[in-house]
Amino acid sequence: MTLNLSVDELLTTTRSVRKRLDFEKPVSREVILECLDLALQAPTGSNAQGWQWVFVEDEAKKKALADIYRSNAIPYLEQEAAERGDIRDQQQPKVRDSARHLTDNFEKAPVLLIPCLEGRPDGAPAGLSASFWGSLLPAVWSFMLALRSRGLGSAWTTLHLLGEGEKQAAEVVGIPFDKYSQAGLFPIAYTIGTDFKKAKRLPAEQFAHWDTW
């Protein structure tokens, strides 16, 4: 099923889905590969295409990855959020509540994804680091857009990468840790309803700079 969304609707309603993931409805490999085919059209530095995509369906491995995520997420979510004095403060309780829901239920998603890129940018200068991640992150976002267009959702999480978590996750699914970097851990599921709306954001004028800061 493909949703009849305009480009603007797709771009403005692709949310980080946590509480509205349908843990009961199976997700076929066919639809995942359709989304991946679209994502692989994204630009990548020097056309290297050094990405690899690890999809996890095995229940024991999903549980192991969820436990790694929880070991970092629980203490993180217990911290007090810094107040910014704008609309983001009003949204924070809802965001944290949905994050806790995902933390508690991560392994229930039908499929988990770890997108990887060949190389280890650890300690690299800013320019090299930006170039490195710029060869993967556009494709990951395209994958999330493709999911949305087919009635599925996900959430881009990175907390499992803290401390020894990335190495532990690599061991769970056999990622060559010394050769590949992980960009996150993504639950994949059909969404409960497809009526997502635009998020409340601060106005573009507040973030735009013309010719100087």
Image: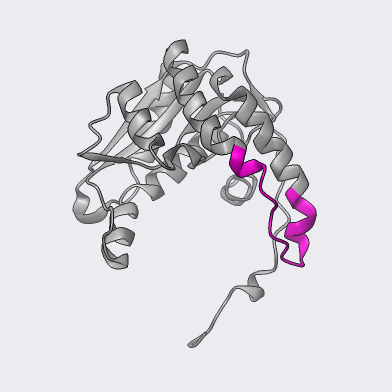
Q: Is residue 165 above or below residue 24?
A: below
Q: Nearer the viewer, residue 38 or 89?
A: 89
Where does the image place residue 32, in percent across and percent down from the top left? 43, 25
Q: Nearer the viewer, residue 9 or 139?
A: 139
* Rendering quarter of residue 3: top right
Q: Is residue 140 above or below residue 25?
A: below
Instruction: Tell me how many marks there are.
Output: 0
Where does the image place residue 5, in percent across and percent down from the top left? 61, 40
| Visual colour scheme | one colour
Q: Nearer the viewer, residue 187 or 29?
A: 187
Q: Is residue 159 above or below residue 125?
A: above
The answer to whether residue 84 is magenta is: yes
Q: Residue at x 40, y 50 (%)?
A: 138
Where does the image place residue 73, in percent across and percent down from the top left? 57, 37
Rendered-image quadrant of the N terminus = top right
Left or right of 69, for residue 25:
right
| Magenta-drawn segment | 75-92
Q: Residue at x 70, y 42 (%)?
A: 96
Where does the image place residue 99, in percent across and percent down from the top left? 65, 37
Q: Residue at x 41, y 42 (%)?
A: 163
Q: Residue at x 33, y 61 (%)?
A: 130
- Asked if residue 14 shows in the view, the reply is no
Q: Residue furthest bottom?
A: 212
Left or right of 7, for residue 56:
left
- Asked if residue 186 shows in the view, the reply is yes
Left or right of 193, for residue 16:
left
* Rendering quarter of residue 13: top right
The answer to whether residue 63 is magenta is: no
Q: Nearer the viewer, residue 150 or 22?
A: 22
